[in-house]
Amino acid sequence: MSETPEFPDGPGRHEPSRARELTARAAERDAADPLAAIRDRFVLDAAPDHASGDAGVYLDGNSLGALPRTVSGRIADVIAREWGELRIRSWTESGWWTAPERIGDKIAPLIGAGPGRVVVGDSTSVNLFKALVGGVRMAGKGCTEILVDATTFPTDGYIARSAARMTGLAVRPVEPARIADEVTERTALALVNHVDYRTGRLNDLPGITHALHSAGALAVWDLCHSAGALPVGLDAHHVDLAVGCTYKYLNGGPGSPAYLYIRESLQERFESPLPGWNSHADPFAMDPSYTPAEGISRGRVGTPDILSLLALEAALEVWDGVSIEAVRTKSLALTDFFLECVNAYVPAGRVRSVTPHDHQRRGSQVSLECSPKLSTAAEQGGAPTAAEVMDELIRRGVVGDFRPPDVLRFGFTPLYTSFADAERAAWVLGEVLGALPDVESGAAGTAG
């Protein structure tokens, strides 16, 4: 099976009958979708409409999830009543103090974790620092290196190098597929992204974790681009430590707090590099000496950011009655359908998918390379950059995003993305790229 979907050379523009077929199929898939009603739990634009030409398609939930309808009323109550009337009493009477663990237990089932293994608070970067330094402190003696996913999100690399300097270790970048071969008895741990933020490639969490453990190393996973989009199975695969944000597929809002997972059997050994008063065994004793709390609470640091925490808690209500397995099924169906529509609507040779075709290696986004090198129109000065293409898509109501130098990213959030959204986005992409000069015969038209 090819690593990326192929877009064979075609007529260059969609045939009307093919477009009618895909539009009808999208409507049929949406009518039969068991998750279709969940869309009403979000604040979204009107559904895409071919007749009016309006798009209204949001495919950037892999950067910022849409607003759940439950959030506004909840935050209004927090501000007016819990803060405005109860004030300091809300730390106990409104459950503010226990929010990091309580909300962690709401996230836990979505990442395959049991109760008491996830705590919410701080940013992804701060939690990553805790996980890396804490992990190194639990590693065996004689370890000299940290392996880091060579394709990682830049911040992960920055934090890893800082943690390595503080602990006297070296950082060695390794392609995720090579980690099983590169890990040695001198490896303390490896930091790996579950889904590559740029290409949407899903890395082998069970296999990599097993390989690390076989060499005596710990596994630290970044779940930012997988949590809420596909099953993770942290407990089942014996992952040691994991972090993730909550503002993408978990829809917690801009800058919503991140979370830290610590395997239950490691919690009593975990020594945080940020021993704040909130993680003290008796925080209100104001003891000048530090004694860590029991269990997952030792992952806390300072006073919780209550407004954003409680907004996240309200946002997580959209998951009531939803299984992550059903979400994964729809995610794969949506991305398959989008790629089929791109093949039908976009002129041959204008884009190339860098997202794996194999379902076992695909997250919940489609990344399309859109580079002048794919088109001879570049020789005529007629090929736009990927950034210009995305700007035009957004102007026409299809919101995705761009990653330099030439990648268009489209994130599919199954809780609210419809098949009509996928079809309409591909149609508008075809309109934008179809306005370019035709590529000459023999131009590249496949993605292999």
Image (cartoon, rainbow, N blue to C red):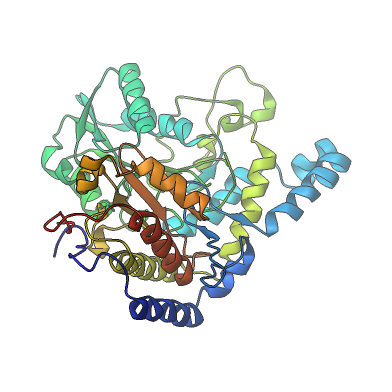
Residue 387, percent across and down? 39, 41
Q: Is 397 situated above or below 301?
A: below
Residue 432 position (above or below residue 217): below
Position of 176 relative to 441 (above/below): above
Q: Is residue 87 left or right of residue 414?
A: right
Can residue 149 be seen from the camera position used here? yes
Residue at the spot 48% in from the left edge and 43% down from the top edge:
245
Residue 361 position, x and y percent, is: 25, 58
Instruction: Please state, as top left, top right, bottom left or bottom right, where the C terminus lies in the image.
Output: bottom left
At x 54% / y 52%, what residue is drawn? 65
Q: What percent of the width, then of the height, locates residue 70? A: 69, 59
> In the shown orientation, is residue 176 left or right of residue 17?
left
Residue lying at the far right in this picture: please name it. Answer: 85
Q: Nearer the viewer, residue 40 or 409?
A: 409
Where 309 sits versus 234, above or below?
Answer: above
Q: How many marks?
A: 0
Residue at x-position 86% and y-position 42%: 86
Asked where in the image residue 244 lies, by quadrant, the reply is top left
Of the 4 image quadrants, the one containing the N terminus is: bottom left
Q: Nearer the viewer, residue 418 or 175?
A: 418
Q: Please identify the quarter of the rendering in which residue 193 is found.
A: top left
Whether residue 263 can be seen here: no
Left or right: residue 223 compared with residue 316: left
